[in-house]
Image: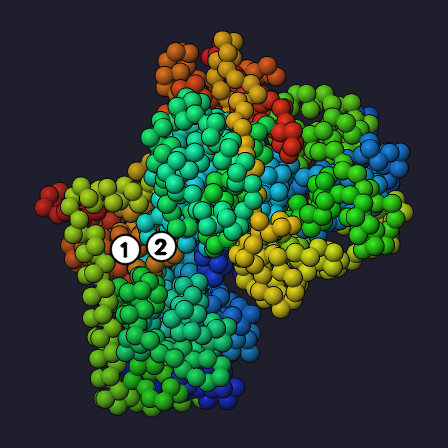
């Protein structure tokens, strides 16, 4: 049932050899296909074996699932967009999807907006304390770790340390905060992220609470997840044991430490914006948005922006067409349309050619709104976003000031 | 069902940004960011973001067309190619001209120039590089040994001063603007010369010098004189790495700074500020484009910016140098491949020695050893014309005159992906495969060679350009010299005779995200992101000053034609618009042509925003919608050249740079009236 916890390990020799942490996730994905529970698996694969080039793959043959085994830290593909754009929101296809917390949140927000059919999905959550930009990671590995990026066979983030393992077996470790202060390390949004365990998925799988890197800690987060795990155990696909209370305590502590670190980053990042005077802030954002070249990259990458006929399109007449930078209404509309539901996935900032701090701004506003409306995006599919549920009375509140 | 992420490179400008195309059942259904690509790191400009729509445009050419009874009619490849072969057999070498394109792949371009030289026996092969960056070769080969970009794109971030010479990079190279912004965040200063107050002037430049169109050489002479007066020249660099400084100094001694202020219209204080900022920088980077090149003094303009770089020693370091910003996907490559009437492949100058070298390489005899004629000259003088992926009816100045010349042609073949303005005049039109419908390499702005794989099949009976040319060569009796069965075979032959590419292989390109920068002399060589680290590529290894006297534009305003007309681009469109006008999201942004008019001029001329005005020069007239804006100063009008029904190049003047044969599309005299 929901809330159950297991320490799991694959029963499949081949998977155990290739996968990390006991290969439970790979075995579960394979079982989901074999058992007919899903029609396809959507997971991330290193394209041509390249760890810096993780791409979504749609798999229908169980024996191909193993190609997605192992964690990739230097990739941030847009899974929810793949589901929405290329699988018609899983409207008529049952899919098991591997999701980081932000992916799961994005899928839930898109479900609320009737862009994804959650009933057809089995969300296999992956615990996550952050991903890295592939190009920055490669530079960092060269300059900070003094290693050839092509020699890296694994990365790991643990206790605020980033470790890389090279193909000759050597490991190199650096303090994550120090790397991040020098502009390397995790993507900016990941540093601020407080959700390490995707409890909004059907199951959440991670390494915390296990030892020797050969087992996976699984937390069951829904009845769907519970049924699935039980079937997998019965079918002998994974071997499980009950986690000790020490193990459960370890998970809690590691999660808390990561959350604390995220809060520190939020404080620091948001302070850089909120400490400015009104005029400074206005000038700062005017300068930032004056760089916009109207590529629509942020809108298209955003899991919250879903309108098929967007008001910002050139032919809608709302924003004068053909201007660079576009009229102020362009960023304003973008921001106000998504800030109640931002899941801090960072995709908008990843794809901005002018490197505007979009994710920083929108997530900061979201944190303020979350407090005001008591609404946490991406957690519960039955909770509708404030923009949909706001009352006349709330709209007339004059004491609310959001610090744009 | 199979949905694949297929990596490819954007088909538009010369940056070479990576994108993923999403394919499903043999069709492209979307595109996604490719975050690992070193050029763009997952980001794209508006065009890159809408990279593939045009492929599926309804009016793609799918079958060969032959003119019968006045109309172009569908026919078979056999009939079309037989007809072309029989006609071309009539042509004497000097009557034939081949116009290749910056859109061609390296393999296409290599085969086209080989066809022209081996089969037709002439060096009359050109490409649109002639119309934009020919002054780079003319000025920079003597100055430094190569006209290619000195630095690589990522290294641009290392500069602490930028001189954006006539390049509105915010709109024309936004992916390079990123690099400039990163450098600015570390304190770099940006100097920008452009008569227009563009987005680059308003939001990127620290020092904007709004000079009068065509006065670049006078401005740079003034800057250099100031640098010498202040003693800021790099004496050690000049002494150890350059030649010809005395001549430059003598020439600059005649420069009158007050006169320069008058000529350029830029206050002397501002010129001083720019000169001192550039000279005092540790690592200054000149990025330049058509604002400098497209003048009849384009070569002089480039020479003078090279003089400036040499004077201050701002070359030979990553992120520095004088960098010609090639605008198109194969702007560099088609030139490297020898689609220029004065260069065999690898920029081997046309002459007995090069002819002999290639006779041996290709196992042929009697290769032409005399230079051919240039692009625009060919349009007027070659009655047998073969045009691939180019629309001279849109990009050549004084288009009406070009049309008259082409209508007199005995035989015009046009090979393209769409019907174009010039295909309307053709005797034969051949359908070509586009960008991701074949496997090929291109060479981007920073000498970056990347390979594009075939993703989908071409429509109808369209074929890769190189295949069409090889099949034609076969019909003309040269099967054994053109028996390529894949683009890889062409690439291998090419790299055996082009030393810059010798170490680059398909296998290496497949495994190197972001490609390899030439020169790459051997297969274990990593490529060369920065040129001239140790010495210049000139025979003596030195940088050569080439003093320049300012000459005023060929046609200046007078009572009858009171405004200066300048032409250029919008961020949402691309050159002749063949691709971008077939991309709905881009067309929606800028659906039609326009003319930018300063508010003062608008009042004087009684023009209101959105009025349709008639623009007239001594060559012809067009209509365009007025856009009243202070982006242009009083006295200057700006028209983009993307739209065939309001075509800027009907107006422009065909005065050519005597050295580079590039035309003065940036300045002419024009009058404007509200359409009655």
Residue drawn 38% across the image and 86% down it: A213
State the SS at label 1.
helix
Residue drawn 40% across the image and 38% down it: B227
Question: Which mark, residue B352?
Answer: none
Distance between mark 2 and mark 1 Cα atoms: 8 Å
Tag 1 or tag 2, which sits nearer the N-term?
Answer: 2
Question: Where is residue B549 drawn, in percent x and y?
Answer: 54, 28
Residue drawn 53% across the image and 68% down it: A47
Question: Where is residue B633 drawn, in percent x and y?
Answer: 40, 23
Question: Where is residue B205 drawn, in percent x and y?
Answer: 36, 39
The quadrant holding residue B622 is top right
State the SS at label 2.
helix
2 and 1 marks on the same chain: yes
Q: Residues within 10 Å of mark 1 (few under 14, many from 20)?
A: many
Compared with A231, A302 (above or below) is above
On the question of residue A341 being in view, the answer is: no
Pointers 2 and 1 in contact (C-beta within 8 Å): yes
Q: Which residue is mark 1?
A: A360
Drawn side of residue B665 relative to residue B342, left or right: left
Question: Which mark, residue A349?
Answer: 2
């Amino acid at each position: 049932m929901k809330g159950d916890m297991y320490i799991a390990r694959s029963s499949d020799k081949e998977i155990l050899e290739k996968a990390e942490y006991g290969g439970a996730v790979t075995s579960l994905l394979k079982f989901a296909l074999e058992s007919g529970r899903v029609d396809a698996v959507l997971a991330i694969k290193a394209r041509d074996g390249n760890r810096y080039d993780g791409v979504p793959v749609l798999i229908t043959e169980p024996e191909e699932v193993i190609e997605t085994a192992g964690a990739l830290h230097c990739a941030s593909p847009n899974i929810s967009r793949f589901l929405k754009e290329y699988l018609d929101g899983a409207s008529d296809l049952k899919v098991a999807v591997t999701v980081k917390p932000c992916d799961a949140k994005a899928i839930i927000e898109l479900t609320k907006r009737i862009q994804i059919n959650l009933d057809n999905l089995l969300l296999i959550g992956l615990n996550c304390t952050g991903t890295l930009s592939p190009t920055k990671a490669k530079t960092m590995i060269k300059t900070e770790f003094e290693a050839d990026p092509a020699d890296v066979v694994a990365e790991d983030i643990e206790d605020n340390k980033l470790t890389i393992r090279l193909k000759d077996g050597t490991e190199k470790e650096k303090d994550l905060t120090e790397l991040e202060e020098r502009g390397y390390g995790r993507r900016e949004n990941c540093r601020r992220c407080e959700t390490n365990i995707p409890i909004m998925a059907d199951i959440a799988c991670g390494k915390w609470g296990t030892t020797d890197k050969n087992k996976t800690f699984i937390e069951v987060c829904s009845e769907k997840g519970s049924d699935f795990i039980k079937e997998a155990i019965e079918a002998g696909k994974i071997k499980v044991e009950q986690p000790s209370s020490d193990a459960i305590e370890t998970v809690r502590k590691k999660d808390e430490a990561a959350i604390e670190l995220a809060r520190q980053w939020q404080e620091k990042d948001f302070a850089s914006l909120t400490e400015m005077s009104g005029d400074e802030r206005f000038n700062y954002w005017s300068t930032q948005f004056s760089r916009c070249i109207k590529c629509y990259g942020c809108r298209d990458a955003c899991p919250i922006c879903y309108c098929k006929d967007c008001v910002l399109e050139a032919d809608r007449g709302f924003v004068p067409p053909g201007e660079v930078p576009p009229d102020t209404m362009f960023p304003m509309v973008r921001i106000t349309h998504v800030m109640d539901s931002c899941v801090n996935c960072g995709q908008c900032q990843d794809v901005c050619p002018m490197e505007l701090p979009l994710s920083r701004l929108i997530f900061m506003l979201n944190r303020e709104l979350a407090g005001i409306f008591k609404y946490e995006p991406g957690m519960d599919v039955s909770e509708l976003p404030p923009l949909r549920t706001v009352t006349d009375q709330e709209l007339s509140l004059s004491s609310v000031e959001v610090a744009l | 069902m199979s949905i694949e992420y297929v990596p490819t490179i954007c088909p538009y400008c010369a940056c070479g940004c990576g994108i993923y195309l999403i394919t499903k059942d043999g069709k492209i259904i979307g595109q996604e960011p490719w975050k690992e690509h070193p050029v763009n790191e997952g980001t794209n400009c508006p065009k890159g973001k809408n990279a593939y729509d045009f492929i599926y445009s309804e009016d793609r050419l799918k079958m060969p067309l032959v003119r019968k009874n006045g109309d172009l009619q569908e026919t078979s490849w056999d009939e079309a190619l037989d007809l072309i072969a029989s006609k071309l057999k009539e042509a004497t070498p000097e009557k034939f001209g081949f116009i290749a394109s910056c859109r061609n792949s390296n393999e296409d371009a290599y085969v086209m120039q080989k066809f022209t030289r081996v089969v037709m026996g002439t060096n009359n092969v050109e490409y649109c590089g002639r119309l934009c960056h020919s002054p780079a070769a003319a000025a920079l080969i003597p100055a430094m040994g190569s006209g290619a970009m000195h630095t690589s794109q990522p290294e641009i971030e290392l500069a602490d001063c930028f001189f954006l010479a006539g390049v509105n990079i915010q709109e024309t190279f936004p992916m390079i603007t990123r690099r400039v912004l990163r450098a600015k965040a570390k304190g770099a200063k940006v100097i920008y010369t452009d008569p227009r107050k563009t987005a680059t002037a308003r939001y990127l430049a620290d020092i904007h010098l709004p000079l009068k169109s065509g006065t670049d050489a006078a401005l740079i002479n003034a800057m250099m004189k100031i640098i010498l007066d202040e003693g800021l020249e790099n004496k050690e660099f000049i002494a150890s790495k350059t030649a010809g400084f005395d001549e430059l100094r003598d020439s600059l001694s005649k420069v009158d700074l007050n006169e320069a202020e008058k000529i350029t219209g830029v206050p002397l204080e501002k010129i001083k500020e720019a000169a001192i900022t550039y000279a005092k920088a540790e690592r200054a980077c000149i990025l330049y484009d058509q604002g400098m090149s497209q003048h009849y003094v384009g070569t002089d303009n480039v020479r003078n910016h090279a003089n400036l770089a040499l004077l201050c020693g701002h070359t030979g370091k990553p992120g520095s140098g004088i960098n010609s910003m090639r605008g198109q996907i194969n702007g560099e490559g088609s030139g490297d491949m020898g689609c220029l009437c004065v260069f065999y492949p690898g920029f081997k100058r046309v002459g007995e020695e090069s002819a002999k070298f290639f006779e041996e390489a290709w196992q042929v005899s009697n290769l032409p050893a005399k230079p051919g004629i240039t692009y625009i000259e060919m349009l007027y003088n070659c009655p047998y014309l073969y045009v691939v992926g180019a629309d001279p009816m849109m990009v050549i100045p004084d288009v009406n005159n070009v049309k008259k010349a082409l209508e007199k042609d005995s035989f015009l073949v046009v090979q393209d992906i769409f019907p174009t303005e010039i295909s309307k005049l053709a005797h034969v039109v051949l359908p070509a495969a586009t960008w991701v419908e074949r496997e090929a390499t291109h060479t981007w702005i920073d000498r970056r060679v990347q390979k594009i794989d075939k993703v989908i099949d071409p429509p109808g009976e369209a074929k890769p350009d190189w295949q069409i040319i090889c099949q034609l060569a076969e019909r003309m009796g040269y099967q054994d010299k053109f028996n390529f069965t894949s683009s890889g075979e062409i690439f291998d032959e090419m790299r055996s005779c082009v030393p810059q590419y010798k170490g680059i292989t398909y296998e290496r390109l497949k495994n190197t995200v972001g490609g390899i920068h030439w020169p790459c002399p051997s297969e274990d060589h990593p490529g060369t992101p920065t040129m001239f680290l140790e010495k210049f590529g000139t025979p003596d290894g030195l940088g050569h000053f080439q003093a320049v006297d300012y000459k005023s534009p060929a046609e200046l305003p007078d009572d009858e034609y009171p405004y200066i007309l300048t032409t250029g681009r919008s961020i949402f469109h691309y050159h002749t618009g063949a691709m971008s006008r077939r991309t709905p999201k881009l067309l929606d942004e800028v659906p039609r042509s326009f003319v930018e008019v300063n508010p003062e001029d608008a009042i004087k001329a009684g023009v209101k925003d959105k009025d349709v005005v008639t623009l007239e020069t001594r060559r012809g007239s067009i209509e365009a919608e007025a856009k009243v804006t202070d982006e242009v100063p009083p006295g200057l009008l700006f028209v983009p050249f993307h739209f065939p029904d309001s075509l800027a190049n009907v107006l422009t003047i065909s005065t050519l740079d005597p050295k580079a044969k590039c035309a003065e599309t940036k300045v002419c005299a024009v009058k404007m009236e509200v359409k009655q």
